[in-house]
Amino acid sequence: MRRGLKAIGALGLVYELLVRPDQLPMAVKVVEDLPEVSFVLDHAGNPEIAPHALAPWAALMGRLGRRPNVAVKLSGLVTRSPAPHTPFLAAYADVLMDRLGPERVMFGSDWPVCLLAASYDRTVAVAASLTARLSPSEQAQVHGERRRAGTG
């Protein structure tokens, strides 16, 4: 598997990591072991949205934040949340912004899967509320133009 990931990196391509919460520690290890490969972590690693789950997930996001070759999608949280409007989602978004910075966080709607929990418009509105504390230019980074992970 790692030989294939190295080949992806050599071609200048980005590999998307779609993992379950129990697979996130291994995904972080792969990112750390392959600094020459650019990665995007889908759905923020699909964290469990619960008070007891925030700290362990945040620690893993801290490890990812130290790696310039990774970006994270701010997506899928609405679907994983017990309620799409829960204020607790803000804690997860804040961790992403604090650990990776808005330049390495990108909004993703998770459409059509988001429809299991909320409408597309509601999903977009939740994402806007989660990034409201950011400056306008930082919000544009998350919701707009992106730079590839690892390109500065």
Image (cartoon, rainbow, N blue to C red):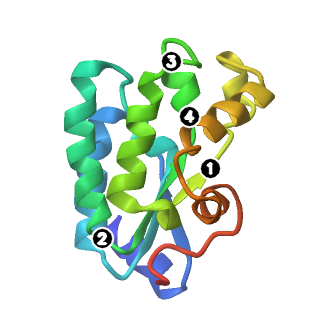
Q: Which residue is mark 3?
A: 86
Q: CA distance from mark 4 to mark 2?
A: 22 Å
| Disc 2/disc 3 C-alpha distance (Å) | 30 Å
- Amino acid carrying mark 1 in the image: Phe
Question: Neighbour class for label 3 at 10 Å: few (<14), some, many (≥20)?
Answer: few
Image x and y of residue 89, in percent: 46, 28
Place of residue 131 in the rendered image (x, y in percent of width and height, measured from the top left): 56, 45
Foreground pick, 67 / 127: 127
Q: Amino acid at mark 4?
A: Gly
On the image, the x and y values in percent for residue 102 come to 50, 61
* Real-space Cα separation, disc 2 to disc 1, in angstroms: 19 Å
Question: Closer to the camera, 136 or 89?
Answer: 136
Which amino acid type is shown beneath numbered disc 3? Thr
Question: Secondary structure beneath disc 2?
Answer: loop
Q: Nearer the viewer, mark 4 or mark 3?
A: 3
Tag nearer the camera, 2 or 3 = 3
Q: What residue appears at the point 28 percent right and 62 percent down from the top-left corner?
A: 30
**Displayed quadrant of residue 38:** bottom left
31 left or right of 81 in image: left
